Image (cartoon, rainbow, N blue to C red):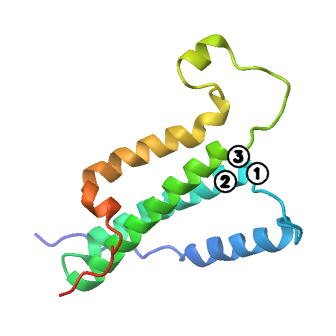
Amino acid sequence: MPSAPLPEPVENFVPFATAALDFHRSLNLPAAQAPASRADLDALHAHLTALYRLLGSHTARTRPVALIEGDRLRATRIRLWQAADHLHDAFHAAPPATDGRLPSREACRARLPEGAPDLTICQRHLSTSARVRRDHTPTDLHDPVTGLTRH
């Protein structure tokens, strides 16, 4: 029985995402030195985790037919996770917005003093880290020479 033909791919949105990032940088980042806001760090983390998932799809499709290119995509994916992990740490190192409210005693005991609205980055990070643990070994994630696989 013949299989159904594959649908035509939709227009490639990655160049638009790249242009939007460049546009954001040129319009919203001042030339003066200033720390990154938690909102920007959260948005960058969302962007990197989305790229991680996109590269996962490309890696899964590429590796069976082109091993060397698939290995390079896999190494890139690992590096993206490492960058997302650093962004998550930077988010928590950045000073919180001062709105005058103090964290509740229960939130401090639960080690979540920032509360639910500010922890969407943590929820995203935890859900992505579950996928990372399934797809990569601890050695892969901590290898300083990721991507230098020889064939």
Task: Give the CA distance from mark 1 to mark 3.
Answer: 7 Å
Q: Which residue is drawn at 24% across and 85% down?
A: 68
Q: Which of 143 and 26 is in front in this view?
A: 143
For the point 85% across and 70% down, which residue is it? 27
> Which quadrant holds the C terminus?
bottom left
Percent position of residue 93, x then y: 65, 45
Which amino acid type is marked by label 3? Answer: Ala
Q: Going by the image, does 136 lie left or right of 21?
A: left
| The label number, if any, that marks residue 94 in the structure image | 3
Q: Mark 1 points at which residue?
A: 37
Badge number at residue 41: 2
Q: Alpha-carbon distance for marks 2 and 1?
A: 6 Å
Circle 1/circle 3 CB separation < 8 Å:
yes
| Percent x, y of residue 43 | 65, 54
Residue type at mark 1: give it: Ser
Specify whether 38 is left or right of 57: right
Q: Residue at x 71, y 47 (%)?
A: 38
Question: Does residue 136 appear in this view?
Answer: no
Task: Kindly check if marks 2 and 1 are in contact, taking CB atoms under 8 A apart as contact.
Answer: yes
Q: Which mark is residue 119?
A: none
Q: Earlier in the sequence, mark 1 or mark 3?
A: 1
